[in-house]
Amino acid sequence: MKTAIQSAEVIVDIGGQPIRLCCGDPRFLDMVRQRYAGYVSSTSDAKFEFEIELAEPNGESRDEDVQVSWNSGQWHMARGDFRAQFNPAALRGRIRQTINPYSLDSVLRIVHTLLLARQGGFLVHASSAVRNGKAFLFAGISGAGKTTMARLAPADAKLLTDEISYVSFLQDRYIAIGTPFFGELSRVGENVSAPIACLYLLAKGDKNTIEDVSGVDAVRGLLENILFFAKEPELVTIVFEAACSFVKRVPVRRLTFVPDNRVWELIV
Amino acid sequence: MSENQKRYVARSTAIAARALGDELMIMSAISSTLFTLNETAMAIWEAADGATSLEEIVSARICGRYDVVPEVAMKDAEEVVAELAGHGLLLVSPEPIAPAGSPVSKELA
């Protein structure tokens, strides 16, 4: 049923999952449109909807760990700067935060990890780019070289993200999709997708080398980088299965590299 | 060994396991910790149905397969079981353990 008072809204479509964000404050929605430029949808159809309530700033901290829990049919997400709920059955949620772009960004990352898990996909700490119709992922912890690989990408590569890669499982293959989730590069990824040709686990070294990683080491290397907020046993199992499935279908290699553009000559 | 000294072992349901090549990976759904089992541990793990005693498992799956003295095999198996149980991957009981339903069957997002 429509409410008597319609709040303004913007639809952000990441990975083919359009989320309607409703808020009574047009300044905030303008900020959302700018922040997610390239991912704002003009469709009137959104599968999911979040009502955003803005609170007055009160010294909130974004340094705390995010807490995600499942209770009474809803996901509950909280950090110093926001509280949110998401009811997956109703496809609806609520966010309470101050006017800033970071809280919503965190909620969207969490929500997408939850949505993707059910579909065999995941978000992973990796930069990624599409070249010659193939997507390449470069995974690693902070400082491993994700942003460096993105920065060194040749001009004909389309950058999907320098920070958080969106991995979807579609028609028995893994696809990387652009995201607006950026890191040091502060650049929204291109909203394009391609089948994943390889996942590289990054390490910096004094020469460029590539070695195959398989089996347990590949799963472990991937799991270490998957964004994983909820601790519910069923979700842990699903993510584990997704990681095992991924390494069976996609080559995983360790890329030790010198940070200059010659490294991209090895990426084929 | 008398009947009441037997121990029964059963795989925890709060785990996810997957064989990859010759290795078995187990992820604890409670702690999100990843474990890899060696050949001996895999043999015990696969036979840990809650109805077969550890002694029978060692006799059939370890001594029957490897050239090892039963006492040594049993001691090694006890260490493996203690470690797996310590991580919540195996349940150990002096009585047979009834099969449990999945603890993770609730519908999530």
Image (cartoon, rainbow, N blue to C red):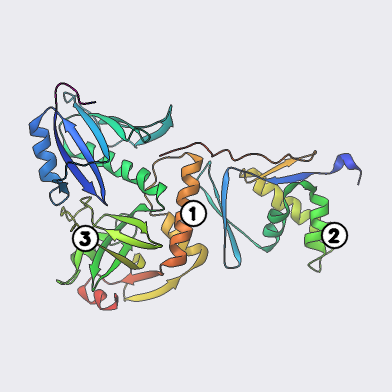
Q: Quadrant of the C terminus of chain A?
A: bottom left
Residue B14 is situated, as x and y percent measured from the top left of the image, at 58, 42
| Residue A80 seen in render | no
Between disc 2 and disc 1, the foreground one is 1
Query: In this rendering, is residue A64 above or below B74?
Result: above
Three-letter code for the amino acid on which mark 1 is drawn: Glu
Q: Disc number at residue A241? A: 1
Q: Residue furthest front?
A: A1
Give the magenta part as a residue range: A2-6
| Residue at screen point 71% across, 49% down | B81
**Circle 2 — which element?**
helix
Crowding near the residue tagged with mark 2, few <14, some 14–19, many ≥20 C-alpha atoms within 10 Å: some
The chain to which mark 1 is attached is A
| Residue at screen point 91% across, 47% down | B1
Q: Which residue is mark 2?
A: B70
Q: Which residue is mark 3?
A: A192
The one of A217 and B103 positioned closer to us in this rendering = B103
Cα distance in 3D space between marks 2 and 1: 37 Å
Disc 1 + disc 3, Cβ < 8 Å: no
Corner quadrant of residue B96: top right
